[in-house]
Amino acid sequence: MQTPRPGRDILDRALRASWLAAIFIALVLAPSHPYDALSLLAGQLIAFLHFMFLRKIVKLFTEKRGGAGALIAIKLVLVYGGLMALMSWGRVRYAPLCAGFALPFLALFLKSMMLAFGAGPASLWRRPRQPVGGSGVSGAAVIAILFVLAAASPALAGPPTVTDTPASSKTHAGEAAIPDPSHPQPAASAHHEEGAAELPNWLVILHDWNPDNPVITWLDENQVIVFAWIAGFLFLFISWIAMRNAKMVPGVLQNAIEWMVESMENIAGGLLGEKHIQRHFPIIGALFFYILTINMLGIIPGMKSATSSLDLTLALALITFLYVQFWGIRNLGIVGYLDHLAGSPRDAIGWAMLPVMLPVHVLGELAKPVSLSCRLFGNIFGEDTLIVVFVGATAMLIKASLVALAVPPMAGITALFMMLQTLTSIVQALIFSLLATVYLYMMLPHEEHGPEESHA
Amino acid sequence: MTGKTPKKVTGWRQVGLLSSIPFILALAPLIGLAIGMYLDRHFRTKFLWIVLLVLGFVAGVRETIKIVKLSQQED
């Protein structure tokens, strides 16, 4: 069944939403910070031009029409020249310029995630391809999130005059939302270097209770590793419990685990083909279930999602990257792999372009794992921050004796976000492992696998 | 195991692929810039950062085109 391509529509709506958000924020900023507002709008304009040119270029390339070179040159001059000119002008502020530049990217990302609820995997929600709310909903969501973050950031940063060190702005939400002047902000708080405002987990509580114990201090300083280990052991433990007495007529847990594994194998197998999936499912399945366990761990109070740290997501992406490159070398051979990296030059022009194409290919290969890790980190970190903001806001309202007004709606919103967090945890784990599968698919010899390689 | 790609897989694959476009577009030039700055420091040059920034941008666009093509493949 042929349906209209959603890509262009999504880009249009994302750009509209980002313009709405940018104009709204600029209007709010204009009275007090006019240059910030102008910088934000300039950033938005540059990003808008970037996307408009990119759309034209992609269209020309995919439809194999000429003229892309000229467009790329115009784009380089207009977008990057404009950006450099703006940055060299003294009045422009970098932070709002970058924020304006990032707005369309954020809107596009949110829009593409909304595919999951509307036009994308329709089977999930039994909703066929239909618009879900249009740009207004997304724009409102972006504005609401920005406002909540902006409003809560001074509160989360703690009292500005007590200790004006970087560590003082990196304390936990519980402490930060209700600042306690009697708490001397000891060295105990100085180790949270990531700048992440997060709900206190059991390690933080343990460390606050006994800050002098070297073991507890070490554990607290290496929270990401500890929670990644916990997730790993939990994953192994659940698998062991479920499968230690595997029966032909499975019990509830065995049935659930088998269903999950088979579903994941079907999904990945549908992409890779039956021959390859037998070989590669162990790593794809392990990635999915490990990330799922880590993400789900963060929902339990007192625990933390280790994927809210870029360190772990980069490590996972690095494993995927090395695995994919290993299989690329193994399948293509060293010469074939280098030929693939060089863009398979077959004529004089191809060889002449080799010095340019080789770094371009290498950079493209590097961008894939980094984009994988940044997306996973960004989503999980964003969820955590969102919940912290609402918990912090609730605490502030309680402190201001607005209990009746504050608690019911805020608790409801927080619970809603936690439900959303559950869904996003699954979606992000699935997307990470599916994209790892797609990258593997792009590296495997095409004539051997699956139903999709009818292309030359 | 099925031998045919289920419909929902195509949907998820599209979600994953399309949502990676902004990251790749933004990160490829940044990776180029980082490598260029490192090489500049290493070889004591002053121009490699801009060369690799542009190459990173080209790589991002190229990956985007590949992703768009891949996401448009039907079963």
Image: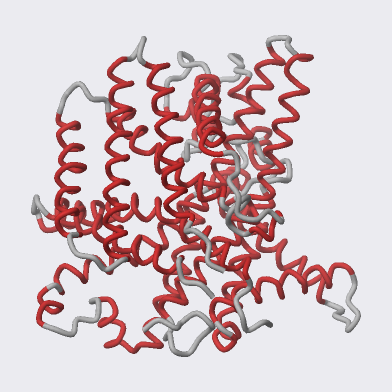
| Rendered location of residue A116, percent (x, y) | 60, 53
* On screen, residue B60 above or below A439: above
What residue do we see at 30% from left, 46% from top? Answer: A52
| Rendered location of residue B35, percent (x, y) | 24, 57
Residue A27 horizontal side relative to residue A400, left or right: left
Residue B40 horizontal side relative to residue B3, left or right: left
Look at the image and tell me in which quarter the C terminus of chain A lies. Answer: bottom left
What residue do we see at 77% from left, 70% from top? Answer: A257
Q: Residue B62 appears in which quarter of the rendering? A: bottom left
Look at the image and tell me in which quarter the N terminus of chain A lies. Answer: bottom right
Residue nearest the viewer, comparing A154 with B4: B4
Residue nearest the viewer, comparing B45 with A99: A99
Residue B33 horizontal side relative to residue A160, left or right: left
**One can see residue A188 in this view:** no
Residue nearest the viewer, comparing A404 with A11: A11
* On screen, residue A23 above or below A236: above
* On screen, residue A434 above or below A162: below
| Rendered location of residue A151, percent (x, y) | 53, 20
Q: Which coloring applies here?
A: secondary structure
What residue do we see at 40% from left, 63% from top? Answer: B68
What residue do we see at 37% from left, 56% from top? Answer: B24
